[in-house]
Amino acid sequence: MGAGETDSELIPWLRDARERSLSLIADLDDDQLLGPRLAIVNPLRWEIGHVGWFQERWVLCHAAAQPPLREDGDALYDSSTVPHDTRWDLPLPSRTETLEYLAEIARRVCARIERGVLTDEDRYFVRLAVFHEDMHGEAFLCARQTLGYRSPWWAERSAPTGEAGPLPGDVAIPGGLFLLGAEAGERFVFDNEKWAHKVPVRPFRIARAAVTQGEFAAFVDDGGYRRRALWSDAGWAWREGLGAEMPPYWRREGGEWQRRDFDRWVPLEPHRPVIHVSWYEAEAWCRFAGRRLPSEVEWEVAAAGESDGQGGLAAARRRFPWGEEPPGIARANLDSTARGCLDVAALPAGDSAFGCRQMIGNVWEWTADDFQPFPGFVVDPYQDYSAPWFGDHKVLRGGCFATRGRLLRNTWRNFYQPHRRDVWAGFRTCAS
């Protein structure tokens, strides 16, 4: 590919990612930017500095061999060496200094792109920095929900409107050999997606849509959190240790369920996907309903596979559930174009070949599998992206309403420890 073809998107992407990052902290005061010391969030003043440091580290220092702007940058912002619990105690630059630091890094990166001297390796690291910032932008939004801050876009984004309703039922997926993972033709993939390899798949049935809040409320109302038989040993130990009785942002008010949406309590929307539930809660709901979580390969088959017309799987795979075209608002709820999730029956234009809806966007979906490397895994230059987390994390797929569309494709793998429920995660299920 020529430089014009590969470089034209980079500066708009960089500016867009930075604009979004800044919009997520612009209205917060200095106390909110530091926030309470919690294991599931970072101090936002540290995290925004880390985003700039990461961009400088890989695009300017590593790829372009430029000296760092701050001699103390690594000591402050290197997430691989700065323990999480210490980030509140660091001598962090002021808000003004931090924003100036980010602006100067962005100026230098854009100037380097504009000079037209980028190699393919340079382009890789620019994209890495953009996608890293996109992921932190989603984390900023999770932190605002966790801490009960107001929605940053309350005036600018429209609330999801229209009652699309539920989407019950399963679709049948044929068995066969499926090519799981990314192929080498992609311009950028993360190391945990590499490389595509054939996996045998037995026929199975998977839900057309994610589990809804109404369906999950039935589990809560039936005493699901107190029924030991529904929980694994690890899940029950987690539930007892936390004292969990319902999803984290739910409450009963006047006999009706409500959920906390940032700093506001709203009536629970029965047909939207349940969100902010841990893998353990998803697993327990499945036992309650006589269902199971899909394996990672089953999820990807349902999203990307096609029938061969003879009762098996075709060799062809789709980049997105609907085909090769990038996401748009008619197909996927992404990029925070709405203030939250849509009903599970919304966006039929985004259906997969087998009829599964919203497999990209709306809500992350837990799968049954541990996060593990694919065969022949080789770590990428950013060595701490995947390798440290193999084994004790679970795989999530599909993205959510707050995920940037440019990040995603059917092969994209997210991963969190099974107790986490601060992220925008729900689940769909398979017939047992």
Image (cartoon, rainbow, N blue to C red):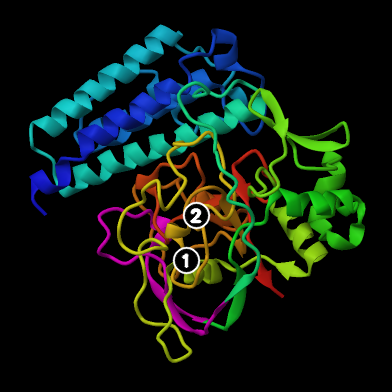
Kindly give the residue lying farthest to the bottom in the view shown.
Answer: 310
Crowd class of label 2 (few under 14; some 14 to 19; many from 20; radius 10 Å): many
82 or 139, which lies in front? 139
Q: The residue tagged with tag 2: helix, strand or loop?
A: loop
Residue hosting label 1? 303
Residue hosting label 2? 398
Regarding residue 75, the answer to whether it shows in the image is no
Given the image, on which type of amino acid does mark 1 rest? Ala
At x 72%, y 39%, the residue is 268
Verify CB contact (< 8 Å) between mark 1 and mark 2: yes
Please provide percent x and percent y for residue 57: 32, 32
Please provide percent x and percent y for residue 229: 90, 63
Magenta stretch bounds: 172-200
Given the image, on which type of amino acid does mark 2 rest? Gly
26 or 331, which lies in front? 331
Q: The residue tagged with tag 1: helix, strand or loop?
A: helix
Location of residue 125 with respect to 295 vertically, above or below: above
Regarding residue 333, the answer to whether it shows in the image is yes
Quadrant housing residue 9: top left
